[in-house]
Image: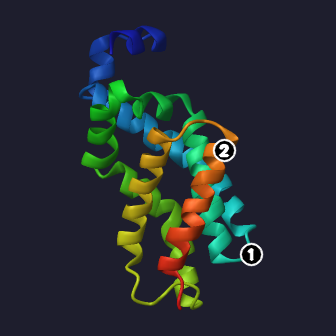
Amino acid sequence: MEDVARAAGISRATLYRYFADRESLLTALVRRRARQNMKTAHAYLKRRRTIETRIVDGIVRNVRRGKHDPLMHLLVSPEQMALATKLLEGTGLANELTRELWEPVLREAQEAGEIAPEVDVVELCEWIAHLEIMFISQVEDTPEAFTWVRRMVERFVVPALTPR
């Protein structure tokens, strides 16, 4: 917190008026960064013609962006995994942000009959949040790894969601 206050040119006391602790500061930062990317993410998903390609391309895109984002990379590193779990999952932040991105897309697809009616969209968003965090934290940042993520989503996620 001292480093942040110094970089911002304010006192630690002033910083603590806005953020109670390191976790609340990081939570605000993650929320802000995610929301800054939300508009481009929605546009990206809208350019995909089917819900299958939206899901596959969207998850792969989010994993790739997560691997390349210095903050996410730091949070999901083995040394910071406890903090990431607390921030992203314990506070519900990951679910909140995932719902902001995916829920409108998934509800529209469900209304169009592209997603099975029995699928609970809110739970699906929660599951996608966990899935993306797992991929970001566990796969390498290589073309082969992203091809593998794509294949896993195509083979196991999409068939579970779409009507038979």
Which residue sits at x=45%, y=39%?
137
> What's the mark number on residue 144?
2
Q: Depth check: 61 or 34 in front? A: 61
Q: Nearer the viewer, mark 1 or mark 2?
A: 2
Q: Is residue 84 above or below residue 151?
A: above
Q: 90 or 29, which is in the foreground? A: 90
What is the three-letter code of the residue carrying label 1?
A: Arg
Q: Considering only order in the chain, which callout, 2 or 1, is on the residue closer to the N terminus?
A: 1
44 sits left or right of 19 in the view: right
* Horizontal and vertical percent position of residue 159: 53, 78
The image quadrant where one finds the N terminus is top left
Q: Which residue is mark 1?
A: 49
- In depth, the one of 74 and 162 nearer the eye is 162
Q: Residues within 10 Å of mark 2 (few under 14, many from 20)?
A: few
Q: Secondary structure at mark 2?
A: helix
Q: Residue 12: which quarter of the image?
A: top left
> Which residue occupies 54% across, 41% down?
66
Q: Residue at x 33, y 10 (%)?
A: 2
Q: Are marks 1 and 2 in contact (CB under 8 Å)?
A: no
Res 65 → quadrant: top right
Instruction: Find the distance from the CA under tag 1 to the CA under tag 2.
Output: 25 Å
Q: Amino acid at mark 2?
A: Glu
Q: Residues within 10 Å of mark 1 (few under 14, many from 20)?
A: few
Query: Label 1's element?
Result: loop
Q: How are the residues colored?
A: rainbow
- Residue 86 image point, x, y percent: 26, 40
Q: How many marks?
A: 2
